[in-house]
Each structure stands twice: as C-alpha cells, then as structure tokens.
Amino acid sequence: MKNIFNPVYREDYLEGYANGHNPYITISENKNEAYKFGFEQGRLEYERLNGKVAYGIPQLIVTNKVLEDFLLAGMLGMDIDSDGYTGYQIDVIQKWYQSGVEKYNANQSNYLLSILEENGIEIA
C-alpha cells in the first residue's frame, strides 16, 4: 500500500473501496493503483459479509450497520427476522446476534423499553 496520507491517493482509494462494496460494479483496468487496491479491499469486505459475488448477489445486502442492528437486537433480547437473507449471511448475522445475546441484561432492556414507551415509541 502506498501513502494513504497523500490526499490524491486517499481519494482514489476510498472511491475504489466504496465501489468494491457494490456487487454490480466490476473493476476497470484503466484505474490507478490506489483505486484498484481500494476496490479489492472493498470487495473483500463485501464478500466477507455476503458471500462471493460469483455465487450470486443476495436479495438483501449485509453491511456493518445491519450487523450492529442485529447485535443490538440480541442485547435487548428481541426476536429477529431473517427472511430474505442467504444461508451464508445468516451465519454471519447469527454470530453478531449471539454476541449481543451474551451481553443481554434484562434490567437494561426493561429500562430502555420504559423510556421508549414514555416517548410514544412502540417496539414491534
């Protein structure tokens, strides 16, 4: 990896990284080294969460934000809906949810639910 502190390199790297997360985009050969490296890193991250692009693009895409939501659901003892996710994605989600379940504290959940109710927010 070159100098990520170079603003031009960093901008190209981040553009490639963002595009690597999009399974519908393929890498272009006429891009520079920073873009290609960023794209490869972004694609590795995407495939770590969703499975290989070569095996197909899932109906729902798992991101770190989605995983954090499942972690929080586990911490609050909430049921999760896994409809629309592939088996590979469910394995990834399950690890995060289980991590949240291990941190589950019924007293904190009841306290949070009472605060939400006071503010007129319903949890389904």
Image (spheres, grey):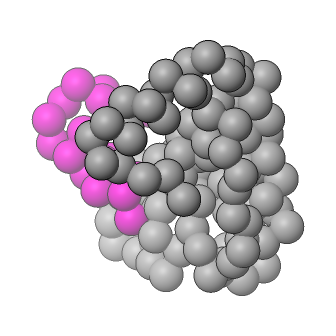
Left or right side of 102 for 109? left
Residue shown at 83%/53% (left/top)?
91
Residue shown at 57%/68% (left/top)?
61
Q: How many marks?
A: 0
Region rendered in magenta? 1-19
Q: Where is residue 17 in the image (x, y as percent from the top left)?
A: 40, 53
Q: Position of residue 98 (x, y in %)?
A: 79, 35
Image quadrant containing the N terminus = top left
Residue 18 within the magenta-colored segment of the rendering: yes
Residue 6 within the magenta-colored segment of the rendering: yes
Displayed quadrant of residue 100: top right
Q: Where is residue 95 in the image (x, y as percent from the top left)?
A: 79, 39
Q: Residue furthest left?
A: 7
Displayed quadrant of residue 107: top right
Q: Can residue 99 be seen in this view?
A: no
Image quadrant containing the C terminus = bottom right
